[in-house]
Amino acid sequence: MARVTIVLPEGLEEQRELGQDWAAWLDRLPRLFSDIVAEWELTRDGDDLWHGFCSLVAPVHTAQGEAAVLKVSFDGDSESEHEALALQHWHGDGVVRLLRADPHRRALLLERLHRRDLTEMWDLEACEIVAGLYPRLHRPALPQLTAVTSYVERWLDDLAGQPRDIPIPRRMVEQTLSLGRDLVADPASVGVIIHGDLHYENVLAADREPWIVIDPKPMSGDAHYEPAPMLWNRWEEMADDLRAGVRRRFHTLVDAAGLHEARARDWVVVRMILNANWSVQDAQAAGRSLHEGERDWITRCIAIGKAVQD
Ligand SMILES: Nc1ncnc2c1ncn2[C@@H]1O[C@H](COP(=O)(O)OP(=O)(O)O)[C@@H](O)[C@H]1O
Ligand SMILES: [Mg+2]
């Protein structure tokens, strides 16, 4: 059979700018993709190629004629390292089914779901649906998973080392360091499998259940870590009253999932300020001032961190 050849989607090609390791992966990707298609006896189903921030996804058929997707992810960081392990463990319970995996090449063959995702629902409905999925995901953690606290500890150290003039209010930096260090020291901050990036676009419509979770960045963590991406995504919809919009989503998630409000709030504050600091660090590393987009994002992160507090 002829080998498949692909042209990478433009949106993925753009990730070249992220550095040498990304460029090298993108150079290898067409070959890697066609090798796996051949080895796993897959056939492409149409010309579509989808992608997220760090992966290439293509609809395929298996040798048995089953509709599936092949997902190949960036291999230069640890985020997708244990995606296969967690998917296998969840066994399709509220989560996409794993049909085959090659963790070394970061390649997954997944059950095909619909293209529709939770962005088509009203945001508060989506929050209720996602909150209903949390208990199915948050099972006892597997020993291979990295503790979320070990990442957070490092990110807090980065924040602590920042000069005083970064565009994040000093009071919020201090608050984040204090709350974050308490959370890192708390044994309750680890112990269950967390998804890590559970937002509207990572929940797809399906036939066997209405909504199914995809794209985990699994870590050993705490359910209260999970809500933040539901607040910072689709923020445009809350633009006329961000504070009220954020609070409605936050309380919907907390109530529907039965989370402790104070603990969930602390994690939101910590995650939002760490997010903001990553943008500051990106600009510092490149030796440039902040882009307008980065300044807007930092402003938004701070606003969300404030909105969940009284
Ligand atoms: N099982 C699937 N069925 C159908 N489409 C999928 C499936 N998995 C991923 N996709 C599509 O590919 C996109 C990127 O996949 P995702 O796993 O979210 O990767 P990323 O980490 O790059 O965001 C998704 O937003 C979705 O549109
Ligand atoms: Mg995704």
Image: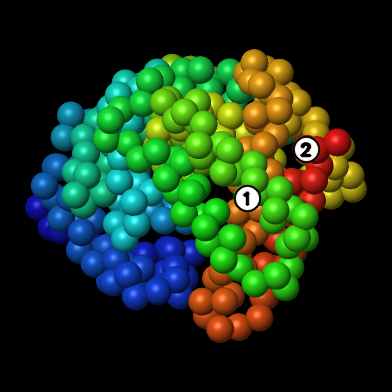
- Residue at horizontal 57%, vertical 76%? 284
Colour pattern of the rendering: rainbow
**Is residue 148 at all visible to an observer of this figure?**
yes
**Is residue 44 at all visible to an observer of this figure?**
no
Q: Nearer the viewer, mark 2 or mark 1?
A: 1
Taking the image as shown, residue 184 lies to the left or right of residue 164, namely left
Q: Quadrant of residue 225?
A: top right
Disc 2 marks which residue?
308
Disc 1 marks which residue?
177
Task: Answer few, some or many: residues within 10 Å of disc 1's Cα (few below 14, many 20 plus, some between 14 and 19).
Answer: many
Vertical placement of residue 31 versus 63, above or below: below
SS at badge 1: helix
Taking the image as shown, residue 153 lies to the left or right of residue 25, namely right
Taking the image as shown, residue 264 lies to the left or right of residue 151, namely right
Vertical placement of residue 132 versus 112, above or below: above
- Residue at horizontal 36%, vertical 26%? 141
Mark 1 is on which residue type?
Leu
- Residue at horizontal 53%, vertical 62%? 158
Residue 260 or residue 101, whichever sits in front: 260
Query: In the image, is the residue at mark 2 within 8 Å of ligand 2 by its beta carbon?
Result: no
- Kindly identify which numbered label has been placed on residue 120: none
Mark 2 is on which residue type?
Val
Q: Position of residue 246 (x, y in %)?
A: 78, 38
- Residue at horizontal 27%, vertical 35%? 144
Mark positioned earlier in the residue sequence (2 or 1): 1
